[in-house]
Amino acid sequence: MTHFEENVKQAGNQKGVSVLYDKGAASQANSEALKAQKLRDGIMRKKPKGKQMSHWNKLRNKAISKRRFVVERTFGTLKRTYGLARSRYIGLEKVASEVNLKAIAYNLVRAANVYINKGLNTA
């Protein structure tokens, strides 16, 4: 079982859910692994060497990028602002707790900002 297949299996996705992944996982084997688990293929496509990428694959990659951006932006903020680029702790349980607490802090700050901005817009 490949690293990709292990990640998908651990995620415990429901049937019919799109699995979004970057171009590093673009392979026929990974697409077939998703199909076997009845998941939708959301892996971005690579440009063939020495050739132009087809118009449809460009549109597909753009659509996937728009969906991935929302999640990637959040992880970038957590790494940059909340120090998730490195962990202060050793051990899976402690690191998981650290990540969860920082995610809670991020969500609280975000909720406060949304609340404040809504209040300003209605005045």
Image: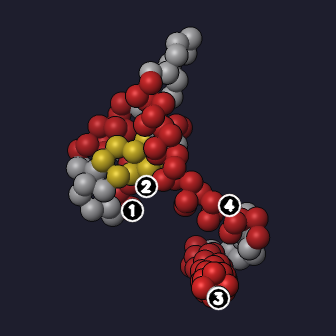
Marks 2 and 1, how far apart in space? 6 Å
20 vs 92, nearest the viewer? 20
In this view of the protein, can residue 38 be seen by the observer?
yes
Query: Considering only order in the chain, which callout, 2 or 4, is on the residue closer to the N terminus?
Result: 2
Looking at the image, the residue that sits furthest to the top is 50
- The residue carrying mark 1 is 11
Task: Tell me the crowding category of disc 4: few under 14, some 14 to 19, or many 20 or more residues within 10 angstroms, Cα based.
Answer: few
Give the residue drawn at x 48%, y 30%.
58
Q: In the image, is residue 80 above or below residue 103?
A: above
In this view of the protein, can residue 86 be seen by the observer?
no
Q: Secondary structure at mark 3?
A: loop
Q: Which mark is residue 76?
A: 4
The amino acid type found where label 3 is placed reads: Ala
Query: Considering only order in the chain, which callout, 3 or 4, is on the residue closer to the N terminus?
Result: 4
The amino acid type found where label 2 is placed reads: Asn
The amino acid type found where label 4 is placed reads: Gly
